[in-house]
Amino acid sequence: MIELRPFKALGGDNHGWLDAKHHFSFANYYDPKRMGWGNLRVWNDDTIEPHTGFPPHPHRDMEIITYVREGAITHEDNLGNKGRTEAGDVQVMSAGTGIAHSEYNREDVTTRIFQIWIQPTRTGEKPSWGAKPFPKGERSGRFVTLASGYADDDDALPIRTDARVVGATLKAGETAEYALGTDRRAYLVPASGLVEIDGVRVNARDGAAISQVGTFTVTAIEDSELVLVDAA
């Protein structure tokens, strides 16, 4: 089953400095039919104006993954972590028992991010933060694991949940397969481009909720950059 969730149908709010679109219920957007997808709880498509951002605020018991599509985001938290994550790269914050952080676009250009929240399957642990560059060349023509809750994905950023975050870049005409367990769910969003998933056309920033399909094939109609969550 592949359910298309077009970008134009997403909920959201425009706050001036932040134009936020929500694939699932979040903040003032509520749809009882879209409360999450497995243990994937939030997928926000955020456009952040230059020299603005999210001031310090707390979280706990949530795995928060930020995928930067354009520009850069600068993170600071009360553990003393500070880092700048650029387009194509990923940061992970495991909120654990509690953390306060800020996320600012300190650039002179607009920053666009996917912010992904996944419910943890391990709780009561100390909070942590990490970031890692993932050069697009290493994802050319195939899916690469960016963040994972599994020990055998040792090149990925660790998350404390039964899930993976993967990415791929495909040239027009290229295909990539993804093996999804029959008891798993996937949510795929093209950061850019246009693809077909087993014949279902998915535009940039649309969401595709995938389940009960086993291995599926993604074909790029245009040069495309993809982000996917494989969730329990």
Image (cartoon, rainbow, N blue to C red):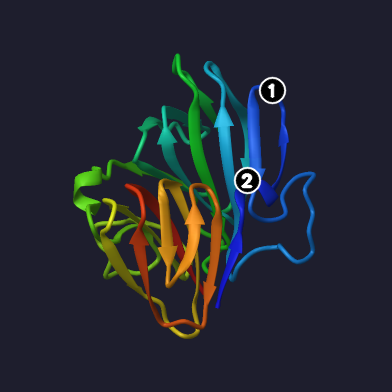
Residue 227 found in image quarter: bottom left
Q: How crowded is mark 2: few (under 14 residues within 10 Å), some or many (20 or more)?
A: some
Q: Where is residue 25 in the image (x, y as percent from the top left)?
A: 72, 54
Residue 202 vertical placement versus 216 (above, below): above
Tell me the residue at 64%/28% (across/down): 18
Q: Position of residue 173 (x, y in %)?
A: 27, 57
Tell me the residue at 58%/55% (across/down): 62
Identify the mark at residue 16; answer none if there is no mark.
1
For badge 1, the amino acid type reads Gly
Kindly identify which residue carries mark 2.
59
For badge 2, the amino acid type reads His
Tell me the residue at 61%/29% (across/down): 54
Identify the mark at residue 28; answer none if there is no mark.
none
**In front of the other: label 2 or label 1?**
1
Viewer-nearest residue: 2 or 60: 2
Q: Earlier in the sequence, mark 2 or mark 1?
A: 1
Tell me the residue at 47%/31% (across/down): 75
Does residue 204 appear left or right of residue 4 in this picture? left
